Image (cartoon, grey):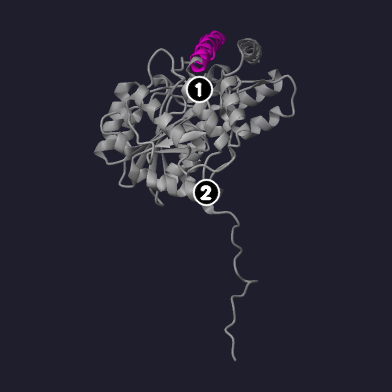
Amino acid sequence: MQTVPGPDIAQRERRERLAARVRSVAPSGIRRFFDLIQTMDDVISLGVGEPDFTTPWHIREAAIYSLERGYTMYTSNYGLLELRRALAEHLARRYGVVYDPQDELLITFGVSEGLDLAMRAILDPGDEVMIPDPGYVSYAPCVTFAGGVVRPVPTSSENRFHPRASDFAERITAQTKAVLLGYPNNPTGAAPSRETLLAIARIVAEYDLIAVSDEIYDRLIYGREHVCFASLPEMRERTILLGGFSKAYAMTGWRVGYVAAPRDLMEGVLKIHQYTALCAPITSQMAALEALRNGEPAVQSMVEEYDRRRRVIVKGLNDIGLTCHEPDGAFYAFPSTEAVGQSDEEFAERLLLEEHVAVVPGSAFGTCGRNHVRCCYATSLPQIEEALGRIEAYVKRKRKT
């Protein structure tokens, strides 16, 4: 019996082991600085975007008690119904937007999983997503990993990094599928006004787009109320709302967040979650339930403290000569490095090596972040004041050279 010869393996061109879309994404620009910190002593970190508060005791106690009662099993793919009901009440009370806890709310492994689910659920290869620049480091890679194309929408310090609706309108193409918003913004702290959000919402409706709105910092806003994108006219049915417990309740390590979306969009989001994650940890969900029920006093206390720190660090940076707008929310200041005559990467690296203060180069968050650095003020006031002293010494020294 004659056999058909197979391909000449020796002559076949070697294939790449990693997918092209994965290879196209550069490693995180933040990671190198964190690796450097691990090799140094006496570093004051203004780099990590994590509350310095410990999760309030009553939330930890609720998780401990749940373990003592044997709550160690899977939950529904959607998450604990009791938690979803509490979350639905929370969103309706705060923002007037109503979701059915049965099938329009999903508990996730933090907002990070929710973002990944949303992108994979709505994007076909080549679909474009408009994202304000600078923005959180995971936004663009999640679009790319889902097969989408990133369409940056520039913002600038002249406008305090607030996005403008006209800049979205100018960049819409036949391939545009979605708008990805994150506000208050990481790294700039900018939170668009209600008028700006309404203008963006009109564009979303006019061009039949989907809005993915990351509102993890919704409770960390100063001097005014947060505007939930899904609460705007016609936006509930067009919005995938992402939120969580990490920032407001100091629960970063618990890895618990949520997706809120209309049923047709949630169907796709849930399908991916079912096959890739199954459900969020029940212990974290029990903690989140306690946070919603009884965590408000702790949230208010932490926000007041962040506001104090915000005023100190912004004034200090401006006094040093590093021009810095006042952030609307989150816990990040975003000063310019131009007065020192250094790029953001050079400034961040030299400041770390010479003064042992860690900040993050703004270019890690997008092209429009160049010549700025992110300074996280989720650290104690004494640490912030010491860091400002070291930064001032560095800036004075560089200006003399």
Residue placed at 51% from the left, 37% from the top? 112
Residue 255 in sight here? no
> From the viewer's perspective, is 271 left or right of 171?
right
Q: Earlier in the sequence, mark 1 or mark 2?
A: 1
User: Which is the main secondary structure of the residues drawn in magenta?
Assistant: helix
Magenta highlight on residue 311: yes
Q: Which residue matches tag 1?
A: 248
- What secondary structure is marked by label 1? loop
Which range is magenta? 298-322
* Image spot of residue 276 (x, y percent): 52, 49
Q: Residue type at mark 2: give it.
A: Thr
Q: How many marks?
A: 2
* Image spot of residue 293 (x, y percent): 47, 23
Tell me the tag on residue 276.
Answer: 2
Quadrant housing the N terminus? bottom right
Q: Is residue 41 above or below residue 15?
A: above
C-beta proximity under 8 Å, tags 1 and 2: no
Residue placed at 74% from the left, 29% from the top? 39
* Image spot of residue 327 (x, y percent): 46, 17
Q: Which sits in the foreground, 301 or 400?
A: 301
